Amino acid sequence: MLILQVLVPRARISTRPNLDCSTSSRAAVDGEQGCTGLATTQEHDGAGGVVNGTRSAIKEVRPKVTLVARMAASVANYDYIVDWEFQTDGLIMIKVGLSGILMVKGSEYDNMNQVKEGQENLFDTLLSENVIGVIHDHFITFYLDMDIDDSDNSFVKVNIKRQDTSPGESPRKSYLKAIRNVAKIEKDAQVQLKLYDPSEFHVINPTKKTRVGNPVGYKVVPFGTAASLLDHDDPPQRRGAFTNNQIWVTPYNISEQWAGGLFVYQSQGDDTLVVWSERDRPIENKDIVVWYTLGFHHIPCQEDFPIMPTVSSSFDLNPVNFF
Ligand SMILES: [Cu+2]
């Protein structure tokens, strides 16, 4: 087991006003300056690659340059800032920042000392006098039309398992092994994340191999996320049923581009990612689409009212035996 702690001094150069983006399109996001709209920025990081001098005569530090493609979408009372960061080592980091005006409702209470202990009709947070912030979720679904070294790809769940040793075999009691399961049909690729049954999620091209014989691939790496806790038959959950799993894989179909279907507000849940995926079509070595849903549970607090500071999360697309 290796435990590393790495501290990297991050020397970020801010975007240059009126040069990297126009003054009118600049915005502070997550404490950083950037551009809104379909703008690009570049950042410079202190340690793109380091060869350590303690084991080698070669000492080298390369600056990391990151290309950021930013999109900001105003949806109802929130602004969603989506950054696609393309890094020189092949890593693609997708960051989502949420900000905006909190959804609130009126309340008879103007202080928490009026709420009796055990009173069950105040599930939300009293933010100000007679103002309650409603508990809610945010889900952002990414449509990843992956083409790893060509259009026909496979989705592989690489499950990490504990292997116990036999009595007397070793002083060690257990070790780790990786089991690769290639998804053959859509149901094989419906994934709910589990901390104690972990997997990596690879998209590979089974016909393109590296020098040592591994299929070239990229992996989807989830970070902080959330799953819907609503009943699957709850009307909003039937419409938003694409949140029933965090990962889905479907064969490419031009009519299947929006996880909630074409007409979300009139939807009874009959044209969503779930309905398509239940067709259980073959997905091995096909032109496939990976759907990843990034979620946030939001229990409002006083700091969120009235204008919410940016809350962020992200996921990565990492090369895995690609180079
Ligand atoms: Cu929220």
Image (cartoon, rainbow, N blue to C red):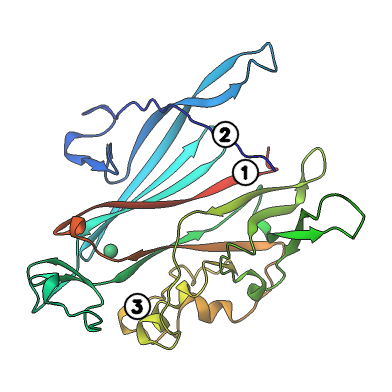
Image quarter for ligand 1: bottom left
Residue 240 position within the rendered picture, expressed as x and y whole percent measured from the top left: 40, 76
What kind of residue is marked 1?
Pro
**Distance between the alpha carbons at the discs numbered 2 and 1:** 9 Å
Circle 3 crowding by C-alpha within 10 Å: few under 14, some 14–19, many from 20: some
Distance CA(mark 2)–CA(mark 3): 39 Å
Q: Secondary structure at mark 1?
A: strand
The residue identified by callout 1 is 319
| Residue in the image at 64% along x and 56% along y | 200
Indicate left or right for 232 with 204 as reference. left
Quadrant where the N terminus sits is top right
Tell me the residue at 82%/44% (across/down).
Answer: 213
User: Looking at the picture, how far across and down is residue 275, in whole percent?
Assistant: 52, 81
| Quadrant of the rendering where the C terminus is positioned | top right
Residue nearest the viewer, comparing 245 with 74: 245
Where residue 89 is drawn, which disc sits there? 2
Outermost residue to the front: 117
Circles 3 and 1: CB distance less than 8 Å?
A: no
Above or below: residue 77 compared with residue 117: above
Q: Choose mark 3 or mark 1, whichever is in front.
A: 1
Q: CA distance from mark 3 to mark 1?
A: 35 Å
Tell me the amino acid under the disc marked 3: Val
Q: Residues within 10 Å of mark 2 (few under 14, many from 20)?
A: some
At mark 3, the secondary structure is helix
Tag 3 residue: 264
Decide if residue 264 is on the left or right side of residue 8.
left
Whichever of callouts 2 and 1 sits on the residue coming sooner in the sequence is 2
Identify the element where label 2 is drawn.
Answer: loop
Ligand 1 within 8 Å, label 1 CB: no
First of labels 2, 3 by sequence position: 2
Of marks 3 and 1, which one's residue comes earlier in the chain? 3
Q: Mark 2: which amino acid? A: Asp
